[in-house]
Image (cartoon, rainbow, N blue to C red):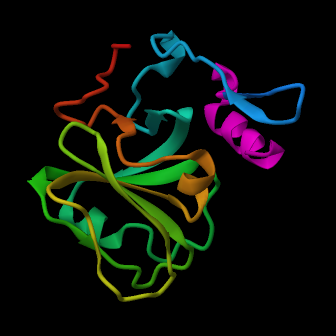
Amino acid sequence: MGSRITAIVLSLVGAIGPAFAETNTGSTAKAELPVSDSRYQCQDDVVWLRGPFGVARFGADVADTQSERAQGLMHVAQMPASRGMLFVYEYPQQVTFWMKNTLIPLDMIFADENGRVVKVHSNAIPGDLTAIPGQGKVQYVFEINGGLAAQLGIKPGAQLRHPAIFSPIWPCGAN
């Protein structure tokens, strides 16, 4: 990871502190983050992700109705790196996305009923009508700018934190 990735992570984590720190040799090493810190509190407009890469914070819009999920990020011309959209389903199910009327490339982070990431689809192509299925039963999908998941190291096994996650593996108010 280079300084560009470090800068992205620092901007995502914001005031909490660095998730990665530069070493004397110019390489990047993971630093420990106090995940029980009060700055990691759940908020309706914030999605947290944690994994071997550290912790990342995203501002988020929530799509938890059928009409909001159908609209998604269609017609959005640009989105800051520190933002995304969380799709919330009533129960775990097979889900499929596409990029109709979507103007920017997106990474789709599919998570199970506990908020555990089960699949990451990278760089979905704007306007493409090809079906993009989740893996197994999915209850949450978090969309971020295309390529960002790979840059940050977000992979299956990572964990989402948000108040809408009904049975979270990383609950609000816990380490």
Residue 53 placement: quadrant: top right
Closest to the observer, 14 or 109 = 109
Give the residue displayed 87% in from the left and 35% down from the top: 26
Give the residue displayed 21% in from the left and 36% down from the top: 114
Give, as a single range, the part of the protein colored magenta.
1-19
* Left or right of 12 on screen, residue 34: left
Residue 58: percent from left, percent from top:
53, 41
The relative height of residue 77 versus residue 26 in the rendered view (above or below) is below
Q: Main secondary structure of the magenta part?
A: helix
Residue 11: percent from left, percent from top:
70, 38
The relative height of residue 167 versus residue 110 in the rendered view (above or below) is above
Evaluate whether residue 87 shows in this view.
no
Within the magenta stretch, is there residue 13? yes
Closest to the observer, 5 or 15 = 5
Residue 66: percent from left, percent from top:
19, 64
The relative height of residue 65 versus residue 78 in the rendered view (above or below) is above
Give the residue displayed 45% in from the left and 11% down from the top: 36
Residue 140: percent from left, percent from top:
27, 50
In the rendered image, the quadrant that contains the N terminus is top right
Give the residue displayed 70% in from the left and 29% down from the top: 29
